[in-house]
Amino acid sequence: MLGIWMWADTLTARGADKVFDDCMLIGVTDVFFLTKGLSGNCAFRTDLAPAMLEGRDLLDEALGAAHKRGIRLHAWFTSAQDKRYCAEHPDCGLYHLTKGRSESIVSITDESYARFTHDIVSDVLAAYPVDGVHLDYIRYNHLLYGWSDGDLERYRRQGADADRIRKLVERTFYGDDADKQAVFEAYRQGDRDVRALAETRINNVCRFADTVLEGVRTARPDITVSAALMPEGAYDTVFAHLHYGQDYERLSGKLDLLLPMAYSIAYSMDDAWVRKVTIGALRFGPKVLTGLHAYEGGTGETLKKDMAAVLGVEGVSGVCLFRYGTAVLAPVNGNKLTVTNPTDAPVTALELSGGKGKQGFEMTIPSGESVDIPYSAGYDALRAWSGDKEICAYMS
């Protein structure tokens, strides 16, 4: 599998056919198409939320273009982030320890919002032949979130001393340097209160998932259900359980496909870490499609190394690039390389490298345009620049 995440507004700039032609030429098998984003607006026709672009059914356009080219399309929902819903229901915002309620992050415990998300997803399944449902932000954002009076009561019901764990979290994030691991070390040592805190957060995330997926499994039992997961949970359960309430083992029982977001550059990590995340995620059963850093900060070299690290792991299903529109795409076509620039900036220079050495090209490729450059075997990586800034490049 070769997946790619795609923002819906990508279609407004270049049109669905050009965008999905690009995907087909580099061998994309699965597109994760943003169907409901952080604003709360939707890329399809529904009475439950406003359209991302008035008068356009972007999901329908994407589906038509994808299926015509044999590409699977997964409807991508940013689950517990919804600025519009928060504005209409201000009491639903996730509560920060010191800053109060968020105006854009919905509490994963809000049952009305979970039912609303269930209904939004059900609307898609009733009217569109999508190949999958993809959940994002199905988590807490940080351990500093989840501290409303209602949250504290839920921790108490699980058996935690809510006042004690609150003070322990305050020490961890606002205390002296010596306290930075306090709550995490307590969890490792089996502290009953901290264990109850983590279990409550995990239960809340799983309950939200169950509410949303009940409708999915009823309407389309065989549809692929996936989730974008924070990478730490693949190898550091303490960090993931406390910060995010994400338990790979528990969520794996509900999902067909895991997409750990192993964004090496964003985490200041290397390809060995990407491999570690992939191996860790595979322990939990479902198929794994590792998400890779293919946006600002990434380069053709870093992406090549990350891909090699993942594809060298036995049992992995493939990789997923984040995201379309942020990297140059360059499929090999016989004795030429067709270089397409879907980014917002013009490409001004390219460099091929490999066993044959390096070959540079000075040229201008405007946004949305393509050029052919000579290619011969022995080159296996492409670098690209816009002025002095190197941009990510994917060569297939």
Image: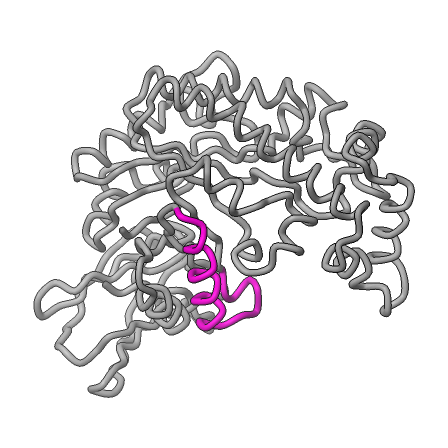
Relative image position of residue 47 (x, y in whole percent): 48, 12
In this rendering, is residue 64 above or below 234? Answer: above
Please give the name of the residue rendered at 43% of the width and 38% of the height, measured from the top-left corner.
Answer: 255
Please give the name of the residue rendered at 40% of the width and 64% of the height, measured from the top-left corner.
Answer: 392
Task: Check the image and tell me how it is coloured.
Answer: one colour
Q: Could you tell me how many numbered marks the image carries?
A: 0
The magenta segment is 263-285
**In the depicted view, which residue is nearer to us: 156 or 342?**
156
Quadrant into which the C terminus falls: bottom left
Question: Viewed as shown, does residue 380 lie left or right of 347?
Answer: left
Please give the name of the residue rendered at 52% of the width and 56% of the height, measured from the top-left corner.
Answer: 234
To which quarter of the image does residue 361 belong?
Answer: bottom left
Q: Residue furthest top?
A: 47
To which quarter of the image does residue 367 belong?
Answer: bottom left
Question: Viewed as shown, does residue 385 lie left or right of 250?
Answer: left
To which quarter of the image does residue 247 belong?
Answer: top right
Please give the name of the residue rendered at 60% of the width and 30% of the height, measured from the top-left corner.
Answer: 82
In this rendering, is residue 365 above or below 167? Answer: below
Relative image position of residue 349 (x, y in whole percent): 33, 72
